[in-house]
Image (cartoon, rainbow, N blue to C red):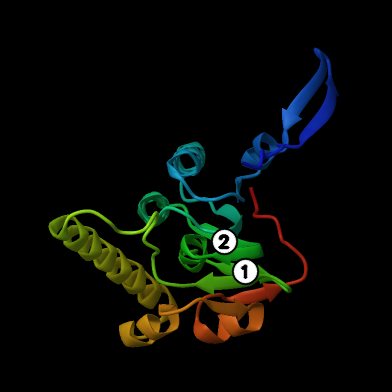
Amino acid sequence: MTLYFAPRVIRETSQGIEHLPIDELMLQRREIWLNREIDSNLADGVIQQILHLETEQPRTEITMYIDSPGGSVSAGLAVYDVMQAVPSPVRTVCVGMAASMAGVLFAAGSTREMLRHSEVMLHDPLAGGGISGSALAVQDKSERLMQMRRSICEILARHTGKSLKQIYRVTAKDTYFSAEAAIAFGLADAVVDKIERSGV
């Protein structure tokens, strides 16, 4: 297991020296950093940040930077639902790679920007740990996986303007999109060389 080191900024204040985590400073600028595998803990943290920022300044843009290999579909869908539910627009910026569930979240942004050498990768939901057990258990798990597949494909169709059939075809295997290809497919809106800060 790789440990994530959270960078900190040292500031001198009237109370002395402060050591502030970078993500705390980013939150003050209405920025969220989604940069690890998506699991329930990460999803909970992202959801809390979105809800906090919406309460603090309703209807003001939030920026979510994404560099993630994807992860849990159910955890990712929880983040997606909150992104869609809050009045604040959630702008997404792809930094490096937005793969699998992270690619879905990226595509769902109100404005979707990609740095020039970033990529999006899409595929069908994976059966984590394999499917085993009794015939009925296997059938139940398979049906749930197919329902997840349909949900993900419907979301992608909604945000790309592509037909469900086109999305099924693209996600049948690992499909990689460069920044330009992502724009052509409707996954992204712009390639950026300079990151513009949201006006706060």
Q: Tell me whether circle 1 and circle 2 mark residues in contact (CB < 8 Å).
A: yes
Circle 2: residue type: Thr
Q: Residue 124: where, in percent of width, then height?
A: 40, 71
Residue 35, compared with residue 139, is above or below; it is: above
Q: For the residues marked 1 and 2, what is the alpha-carbon distance in whole angstroms?
A: 6 Å
Q: Position of residue 83 (x, y in %)?
A: 42, 54
**Type of amino acid at the residue the image marks with label 1:** Glu
Disc assigned to residue 92: 2
Q: Nearer the viewer, residue 155 or 4?
A: 4
> Which of these two is toward me, 9 or 5?
5
Q: Residue furthest top?
A: 15
Q: Position of residue 9 (x, y in %)?
A: 80, 33
Disc 1 target residue:
113
Q: In the shown orientation, is residue 97 left or right of residue 158?
A: right
The quadrant holding residue 94 is bottom right
Tell me where residue 97 appears, x and y as whole percent: 63, 65
Residue at x 40% of width, y 63% of height: 126
In the picture as drawn, the residue positioned furthest to the right comes out as: 12
Crowd rating for badge 2 (residues with CA inside 10 Å; few <14, some 14–19, many 20+) = many
Q: Residue at x 59, y 79 (%)?
A: 177
